Amino acid sequence: MPIFDNPGFAQEPSSKVAFAGNRLDRRSEHRDDDCLAEALASDAMRGFAIAGGRAFLRANGSGFEALHHAEQLAAFDPDLDNAILLGFAETDAPRLAVPVRLDPEDLPQTVKAIDHRSIYIQGLISGSLLGELAQAASLLAWSRTHRYCGRCGGETQPRAGGYRRECPSCGHMLFPRTDPVVIMLTIDTQNDRCLLGRSPHFPPGMYSCLAGFLEPGETVEEAVRRETREESGIHVARVRYHATQPWPMPHTLMIGCYGEAASTQIVVDRRELEDCRWFNRREAAALLTRQIEGGDMTSPPPGAIAHHLIRDWLSHGA
Amino acid sequence: MPIFDNPGFAQEPSSKVAFAGNRLDRRSEHRDDDCLAEALASDAMRGFAIAGGRAFLRANGSGFEALHHAEQLAAFDPDLDNAILLGFAETDAPRLAVPVRLDPEDLPQTVKAIDHRSIYIQGLISGSLLGELAQAASLLAWSRTHRYCGRCGGETQPRAGGYRRECPSCGHMLFPRTDPVVIMLTIDTQNDRCLLGRSPHFPPGMYSCLAGFLEPGETVEEAVRRETREESGIHVARVRYHATQPWPMPHTLMIGCYGEAASTQIVVDRRELEDCRWFNRREAAALLTRQIEGGDMTSPPPGAIAHHLIRDWLSHGA
């Protein structure tokens, strides 16, 4: 069978999730120590303004603008020393992530400070721009928590357009951090049903795929089996990769997989989950519908990789 | 088509790479602040001893022992406050990663300090134990570079058996770090050949898959396309996940994929690669053979995910 056959999934699943599709030209091999200053000097520069996990959006009548030019950024008390060059838009326009210090309370009526999750759920920005925001938010969250050297405690300094930080005291180099998380839909193929759970942190009535951080020294498949067994008591046999999703809360890579259940008796880990149960196709489909139409039990919203795992199983796994 | 069909690959590719197959019971949801002290008090405890990226191995006549009991560890000047509980062996025996301070120069003749890469390449330990070493080495490398809080510069303290560090000054919590790297074999399906390159850091004559760190705000597929285009000028269309490999130098997750070439004209990025070229099946097969039998051009060794990507293409992609 040809190596690129992707049975049942005509289009790349990773391209359909929220925060994917960032089209900036990152030029990652070309980041030198002058690139940030050059970007700041360019009239074509546009930047995201982010303060404490919230992006500043300018109302423009019909919607919101997430990108600001230099003069607009200046009004937000930008910390330009810690700005990060994300890449270049199609017209060679530099794109920046800019940490800003203006108290959101002091923003004019036309500018709103909105957390990244709400921006995505409410669809305030979309497409490539939402992917760029994921990049910006992840990098600034990393940068903010790496101002000091973990090895010696010295103050670090940004390099390579903010994509690296260095400790002048001990020479330690710090690179952006992305945390792999496995998120999986485990299928009981005999009974044609899937395993969903709810965390106490979820909105009322929401059920989703089980998930957890991949641990050091684990493959993706091993992490899927361990997390599923720990949280639900269900043993997983085969694992199949489906898609990934960048998740900027704060800097995560969601790795979406299907798991094939090798047992059916659920033992819920109550420290992690409030509930965990099997959903047949009718019940799972109802969750997705109610997510959109409203109801007592729902799924994660359409942009979430968990939504796609459930939907793609319903569409293709029959 | 059934969701768990994995055409052409009968057995899980991730299970065949070096550093996979760690069988410890991690009990990741059960790590409390007493678990390290309890483990240290157990007669059944065995630990890896690691100093500056090198594990201490005891010669035992026919080979090497990587695990040491309490008395043996004590001779290495262990930093038990920063030991990390990895999990439990089949007999409920606690397994630790222990940073040690004894200068390798002062080791007795029967104990060798060997870097993790050499341990794997020379096959000094194998199977589940090599996977446990990957977990131990990754966690200690993380812990060593997170002694101070990146947010405020305060000294951090280990918690949860060393699986978390906390800053008493500002409350910041630090979790183990795993860096996702994409590594890909790009296939020119029309001409039935694959794209390999060599970095100036490689051993003489070695060619391997292109690879690079996944960036914040990217899917795996996007990272595969970006890295391939940046390093070789080759455009990639479809991407297919193949396997992952834990890589403890220092704490990496290798994500192995196939890419389908959408162009054939190579433009080598000379800052990254010394050479990059197409290899037909015969040439690629010769690389793998010479890796084992010796020769002027070789591939990475059999445990490496790059070796598996090439070999599995040769075996199954015809």
Image (cartoon, coloured by chain):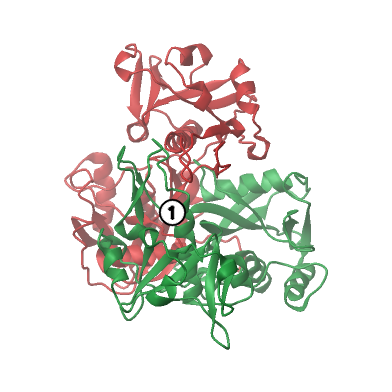
Chain colours: A green, B red
Q: Quadrant of residue A294?
A: bottom right
Q: Residue at x 62, y 44 (%)?
A: A226
Q: Is disc 1 placed on a helix, strand or loop?
A: helix
Amino acid type, callout 1 = Ser
Who's the residue at 25% across and 59% down the image? Answer: A32
Looking at the image, is B64 positioned above or below residue A225? above
Q: Measured from the top left, where is residue B69 in percent x and y?
A: 52, 16
Q: How many marks?
A: 1
Q: Is residue B49 left or right of residue A169?
A: right
Residue A198: where, in percent of width, then height?
Answer: 74, 56
Q: Is residue A69 visible?
A: no
Image position of B98 with respect to A268: above or below: above
Q: To which chain does the residue with label 1 belong?
A: A
Quarter of the figure with the N terminus of chain B: bottom right
Q: Which residue is mark 1?
A: A143
Point 35% across, 13% down: residue: B110
Q: Is residue B159 visible?
A: yes
Q: Residue furthest bottom?
A: A61
- The residue sitting at the front extreme is A106
Task: Give the answer, above or below, for where A206 lies relative to B92.
Answer: below
Q: Is residue B71 left or right of residue B275?
A: right
Q: Quadrant where the C terminus of chain B lies?
A: bottom left
Which is more toward the observer, A173 or B315? A173
How many neighbours does mark 1 have within 10 angstroms: few (below 14), some (14-19), or many (20 or more)?
many
* Residue B145 image offset from top left, x and y in percent: 42, 37
